[in-house]
């Protein structure tokens, strides 16, 4: 069960890394109450708004790669043979770069993400996602 | 159903505001896989560790009050008469102050929080909580 949840969770990052808008859309429940919190942002609600934000992000990031660590999967109801809901949390170690500038323009980032997936006849789908920055990386630069 | 979820969700903030460690402990499932992400922090896992963090926070905050806005409750499975899992998201508008300094030392803060509660024979209990800062409020002060 966890393997199928993790496959969908992994496909989400594949979609972002490859800029595959159709794959991304296929991974979400289409509902007005789904939600997505980007790091440092207020919640976006409803699949149309959530997908629009990812489309904009994918259009504006030249290169992005995620290395996930500390992945935890919990399914609900606990111990059920056919769980209906899954919680996946992980640390996202993010390597990104601008497509139009020099190759040195890569930057790293780190976020913590909690995703909720629900079981549907066609498989697991994303219902919500909450990502947040890790404080050590948002401390202002004091070099000046 | 949403009313009982919201009652437990509200009791959580009552516990923090009144420093009631016993009430806080009564609101969580006791499990090694529960989790809590404080704003800007890495996840804490396991109820013992989660409760310890709240005890420390409550011991160190002289005054804290939460004004919740934009509360959304979704239960799973969707449409079920007896849902097993609930997702509550809200914006926390936080007023806090130090107990030992002047009354002017109040400060405001704002966070977005996603909580997962699960239905147990005794009622709804917290399974996980993910709070994150809103970026506009973590921009460094440039007054100097």
Image (tube, coloured by chain):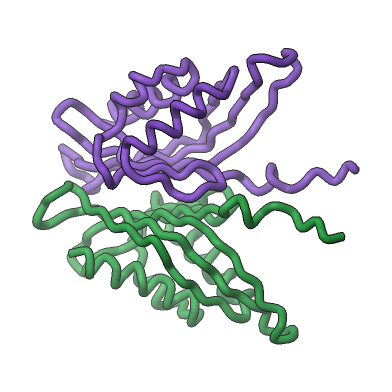
Chain colours: A purple, B green
Q: Name the residue furthest left.
A: B81
Left or right of B140: which side holds A40? left
* Residue at point 57%, 23% (across, down): A61
- Seen in the picture, residue B79 relative to B93 is either above or below; the reply is above
- Nearer the observer, B46 or B5: B5
Q: Using the rendered view, name the quadrant where residue A80 is placed.
A: top left
Q: Where is residue A15 in the image (x, y as percent from the top left)?
A: 42, 21
Q: Where is residue A86 in the image (x, y as percent from the top left)?
A: 29, 41
- Nearer the observer, B28 or A49: A49
**How many numbered dots are placed on residues in this image?**
0
- Image quarter of the C terminus of chain B: bottom right
Q: Where is residue A107 in the image (x, y as percent from the top left)?
A: 69, 27
Q: Where is residue A122 in the image (x, y as percent from the top left)?
A: 17, 26
* Residue at point 27%, 44% (across, down): A32
- Seen in the picture, residue A17 relative to B4 is either above or below; the reply is above
- Image quarter of the N terminus of chain B: bottom left
* Residue at point 73%, 20% (across, down): A105
* Residue at point 56%, 76% (across, down): B64
Left or right of A9: which side holds A42? right
Left or right of B56: which side holds A114? left
Q: Using the rendered view, name the quadrant where residue B60 is placed.
A: bottom right
């Amino acid at each position: 069960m966890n393997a199928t949840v993790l496959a969908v969770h992994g496909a989400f990052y594949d979609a972002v890394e490859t800029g595959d808008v159709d794959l991304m859309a296929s991974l979400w429940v289409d509902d007005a109450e789904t939600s997505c919190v980007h790091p440092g942002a207020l919640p976006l609600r409803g699949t149309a708004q959530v997908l629009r934000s990812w489309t904009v992000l994918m259009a504006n990031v030249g290169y992005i790669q995620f290395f996930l660590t500390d992945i935890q999967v919990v399914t609900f109801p606990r111990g059920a043979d056919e769980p209906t809901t899954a919680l996946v949390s992980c640390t996202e170690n993010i390597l990104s770069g601008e497509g139009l500038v020099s190759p040195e323009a890569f930057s790293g980032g780190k976020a913590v993400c909690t995703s909720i997936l629900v079981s549907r006849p066609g498989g697991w789908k994303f219902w919500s996602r909450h990502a947040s920055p890790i404080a050590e990386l948002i401390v202002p630069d004091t070099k000046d």
